[in-house]
């Protein structure tokens, strides 16, 4: 079900609305189906093939929310690198960044969205399948 | 790749790289879970406080003891609240656990005070049993948190 939904998403992302893609609808569907049901590497999320981004997701997956500094220290990266990675993941709709004022301090909280958790779980399942363990 | 990041791509990742990625991820997840287990430490302190404060409430009467009890309870709750507020990570489902522990503790503490001031007044045995009963919810909660945090 999820694979079908992903395939449909992919198809809508590839073409302008209402326009037949190059090679026709049938070819487009065949490609999407092959991608969804073929080698497990096709189920990997390209955004998470970057080790830092995958580690950021791993740091957040067990948490309702975590502070920016906590993630930075855990993943062992600089503020600017983390900001950049968070922006990419936020743009994908996989996490949310919220700034909360606590007295004179502003705390930056980061949390995964439901979509982000699903993407992370799918990515890990694909990695396990590639290693032959899943 | 689409803007949403869900599109499938040709990553060409091999089994060894996948194994390394999984190992790295499980290490990060384990540390994050451990750091998210602070509520277990909170509950151990709270449980220890109950062993002292419940007998104090049931056996030590008068305005001065009541004041000492109130201040001790306030100090414990304030200290633990400050500790909780300073934590950089909140584990998933913590709200439910806090609600369950505080709810059960509240019922047991209320029953202990009512019974200790009416039926078993000035009874050290009842005070000891009540202290253990009131310490039980935070102890069970702390044990569960410890297991969850690994």
Image: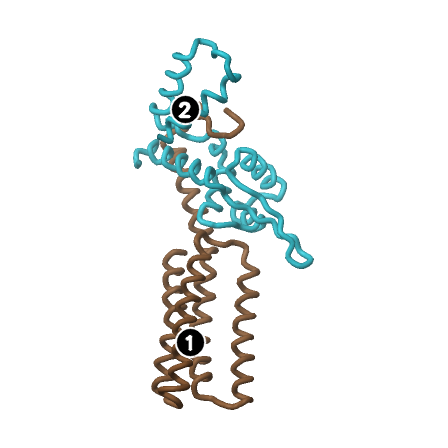
Chain colours: A cyan, B brown
Q: Position of residue A108 (x, y in %)?
A: 60, 49
**In what element is the residue under mark 1?**
helix
Q: Is residue A10 above or below residue A24?
A: below
Marking on residue A6: none
Point out the residue furthest to the right here: A104
Q: Position of residue B109 (x, y in %)?
A: 42, 75
Closer mark to the observer between disc 2 and disc 1: 1
Q: Is residue A18 above or below residue B135?
A: above
Q: Chain of mark 2?
A: A
Q: Position of residue B91 (x, y in %)?
A: 46, 53
Q: Name the residue at 36% across, 31% down.
A: B15
**In what element is the residue under mark 2?**
helix
Q: Chain of mark 1?
A: B
Q: Which residue is mark 2?
A: A7
Are dots 2 and 1 on a single chain?
no
Is residue A78 or residue B45 the one in the foreground? B45
Q: Name the residue at 50% across, 17% down.
A: A15
Q: Which residue is mark 1?
A: B110
Residue A43 quadrant: top left
Q: Name the residue at 35% across, 36% down.
A: A128
Point out the residue furthest to the left here: A133
Circle 2 packing at 10 Å, graded few (<14), some (14-19), many (20+), is many
Q: Is residue A103 above or below residue A124?
A: below
Q: Is residue A17 left or right of residue A122?
A: right
Report, in whole angstroms, how far the alpha carbon at label 2 lies from the one at label 1: 57 Å
Is residue A119 or residue A26 the one in the foreground? A26
Circle 1 packing at 10 Å, graded few (<14), some (14-19), many (20+), is few
Is residue B31 or residue A34 the one in the foreground? A34
| Numbered disc total | 2
Is residue B126 or residue B140 the one in the foreground? B126
């Amino acid at each position: 079900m999820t694979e079908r939904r992903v395939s449909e998403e992919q198809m809508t992302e590839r073409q302008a609305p209402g326009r037949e893609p190059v090679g026709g609808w049938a070819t487009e569907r065949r490609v999407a189906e092959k991608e969804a049901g073929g080698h497990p590497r096709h189920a990997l999320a390209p955004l998470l093939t970057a080790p830092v981004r995958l580690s950021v997701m791993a740091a957040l997956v067990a948490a309702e929310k975590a502070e920016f500094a906590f993630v930075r220290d855990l993943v062992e990266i600089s503020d600017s690198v983390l900001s950049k990675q968070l922006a990419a993941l936020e743009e994908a709709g996989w996490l949310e960044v919220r700034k909360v004022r606590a007295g004179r301090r502003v705390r930056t909280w980061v949390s995964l969205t439901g979509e982000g958790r699903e993407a992370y779980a799918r990515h890990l399942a694909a990695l396990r399948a590639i290693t032959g363990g899943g | 790749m689409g803007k949403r990041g869900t599109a499938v791509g040709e990553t060409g990742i091999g089994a060894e790289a996948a194994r390394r990625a999984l190992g790295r991820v499980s290490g990060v997840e384990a540390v994050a879970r451990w750091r998210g287990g602070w509520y277990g430490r909170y509950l151990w302190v709270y449980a220890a406080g109950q062993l002292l404060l419940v007998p104090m409430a049931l056996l030590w009467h008068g305005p001065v003891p009541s004041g000492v009890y109130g201040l001790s309870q306030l100090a414990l709750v304030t200290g633990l609240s400050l500790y909780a507020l300073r934590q950089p990570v909140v584990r998933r489902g913590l709200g439910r656990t806090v609600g369950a522990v505080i709810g059960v503790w509240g019922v047991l503490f209320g029953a202990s005070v009512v019974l200790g001031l009416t039926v078993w007044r000035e009874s050290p045995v009842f005070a000891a049993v009540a202290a253990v009963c009131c310490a039980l919810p935070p102890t069970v909660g702390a044990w569960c948190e410890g297991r969850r945090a690994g």
